[in-house]
Image (cartoon, rainbow, N blue to C red):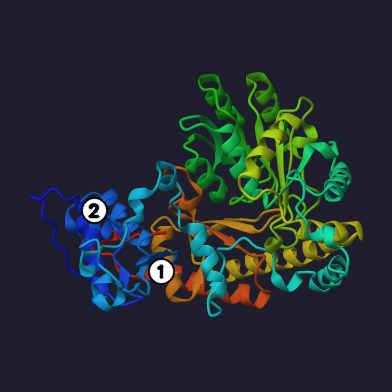
Amino acid sequence: MQLHLDRSIKTPLYLQIRSQIRQLILANELPPGFRLPPERTLAASLGVNRTTVVNAYHELVADGLIQPHVGKGTVVVNAPLSTEHFSLDHFTSCDSGVRPSSIQPISWQNFYTKQSERMYNPVLASILDEIGEEDQISFALGSPAGEYYPLEEFRQISNEVMRSGNWQAFEYGPTIGHYPLRKYLKEWLSHRSIHTQTQNIMILSGSQQGLDLLAKVLIEPGDYIVMEEPSFLGAIGVFKAAGAHILTVPLDQEGLRTDLLEQILSRHRPKFIYTLPTFQNPSGTKMSLSRRQELLKLAYQYHVPILEDDPYSELYYEGMPSPSLKSMDKHGHVIYLGTFSKMLLPGLRLGWCVAPSAVLEQLALAKQHVDLHTSTTVQWMMTDFCRQGLLDKHLHIVRNRYQQQLNTMVTALTEFAPPGLSWTVPEGGFYLWCELPPSIKASTLLTKAAEKKVTFIPGNAFYINSGGKNRIRLCFSRHSETTIREGIRRLCTAVLEILNQPHPASANKRLRYSEPLV
C-alpha cells in the first residue's frame, strides 16, 4: 500500500491519508479482509505522528470502510457502493445543478462531539465480535459458561410470565425498577450483611449502565476520580468518555495500596474512588480486611465517596470472600453495584445499584433519558427465578464447576508454560492474571496467538496511561476443560515460538512499530 503525502497543500495530513486509503478501497485495490498496517508502522513509514494515522483510521471507521479487531489488527470491510458508481438514471431530477458524480459521502467524524472522540476504545466491541467465531478459542470474554445456563428453568418461568391475561409483565414500569425484584434483593443482600431498604435499590440494564449513569450524574469534564490500576476496562472507558482526570493507585497482593491513596487524597479532591475489592478484574486480587477498613477510614477522613463494583464476590472457590465495603460502611459513603451477568445470565442485562435516596433520584432522572426503565418482562422473570430459590441453587453448582475449570487452566499452564511465564491463582472470579517473559510484549503475542486461533486481552487495556505491556488476562470460566487445555497449549506454543525466534538488531527496530490496533 503506497501513500504519498503533500505537505505543500493545506489539506490536513490525516485527511490525505484517509482519502487515499478510501480510494484504494473503493477501487478494490484493498479488498475486504485486507489488513491495514498498524498505526505505528504506517506513521513511521510516512514520517508522521501516530495520532495522525489514528485520526485517519477513525475517519475510515466512521465511513464504514475499515474495522479494528483484537488479534487481527485493522481490516477492510465490504465497502458501501460509492456515489462514483451512480449514473443520472438513479436520480429523478438534478434541480440543484450538482452532478451525482460530484456528491461525496458525509464524513460523520466531523459531526461528532469531543465526548464521542473520548469513547474510542474498540477492545470491548472486538471481544464481543469474537463470540461467533467457532474455530477460535477465546480467553478474552469474561462470561459465564453457556452450558451451565439454567435454560429449562427460565423456559418454564417465561411460559408462566407470558400466560394469557398477564399484560402487566409487558407494560411500562417504574424507572427505579420492579418492586418485587427490589424487595427480593433487599432480603438477599441482607444475608450478605448489606442492610438497606427497598427504596435504596435501583434495577439497571446491567451494572455497566450503572457506571454510565453515575458518570453522568457525578463527573464534569476535568474532575478528578481515583481508580486502582490495573482496573476494569469498561469502567476506564466510561470515565474517560465523561472527561474525568483519572488518578491511579497500584495494587499489591492485598489489593489497593491505601498508603499511596492517602497521598493522593491529601493533594486532590476526587469525586469518588472506584474499586473492585473482591476478585478484582483483571488481577483476581481480593482486598484484605485491614485494607478495606483503611479504605473506609480514608473515605470518611477526606469525605470522598466510594464506588464499589462487585460482580464476582458470589463466585468464590476457597473459603468465603471478605465482607463487602458496603456491608462495612456505617456512614453512607459507599455506592454499591451488583449484577446477575457474571453469576447467571449476561444476556438478560440485569444489575442493581444500592445508594442513598438522593443519589438514586438523580440516577433515575439520568436513566429516564436512556431507556426509561429496564425491561419489565425480564424483571418479572428474574423475580420468579429468585423467589423459587433457583439463584442460590445455581450459584452452588457453578462455584464447583468454575473451580474445576480454574484448576484445569492452572494445571495446563504448569505443564506447557515456558520459563518466564508466571501467573497468580485467584480465590474466585473468572480470571488468571499472567506475566509474560521479560522479552515478550503482549501485543506481539496477541498477533502470534491469533494465528493459532487463540485470543486473550493484553494487559495494557486495563491501564489508564501506560503499563501492562507484558501482562495478559485469561478467562477460564467460558470453556470446557478440554478446550481450556487445548487453548493453553496453543498459547504457550506461541510464547515459545517468539522466545526461540532470532532477534537481529534490524528486526528489533522494526518490532518497535509492530503493535496491532486493539
Q: Is residue 148 above or below residue 359?
A: below
Can residue 340 be seen from the camera position used here? yes
Q: Quadrant of the C terminus?
A: bottom left
Position of 491 compared to 19: left or right?
Answer: right
- Which sits in the foreground, 229 or 180? 180
Residue for badge 1: 72
Q: Say what secondary structure mark 2 lies in.
A: helix
- Report how far apart the C-alphas of labels 1 and 2 lie in the structure: 23 Å
Q: Is residue 458 above or below residue 219?
A: below
Query: Residue at coordinates 21% horizontally, 63% vertically from top-left?
Result: 98
Q: Residues within 10 Å of mark 1 (few under 14, many from 20)?
A: many
Callout 2, which amino acid?
Tyr
Tell me which amino acid carries mark 1. Lys
Picture quadrant of residue 391: bottom right
* Residue underneath mark 2: 14
Look at the numbered discs 1 and 2 and tell me whether their residues touch, using CB distance below 8 Å: no
Q: Quadrant of the N terminus?
A: bottom left
Q: Nearer the viewer, residue 232 or 110?
A: 110
Q: Mark 2 packing: few (<14 Cα in 10 Å), some, or many (20+)?
A: many
Q: Position of residue 324 (x, y in %)?
A: 76, 40
User: What residue do we see at 53% from left, 50% from top?
Assistant: 233
Residue 230 visible (yes or no): no
Residue 34 horizontal/vertical position (percent): 32, 74
Which residue occupies the foreground of this view, 371 or 211?
371
Q: Which mark is residue 133?
A: none
Residue 211 location (% of width, % of height): 61, 44
Of all residues, the one furthest to the right in this rendering is 388
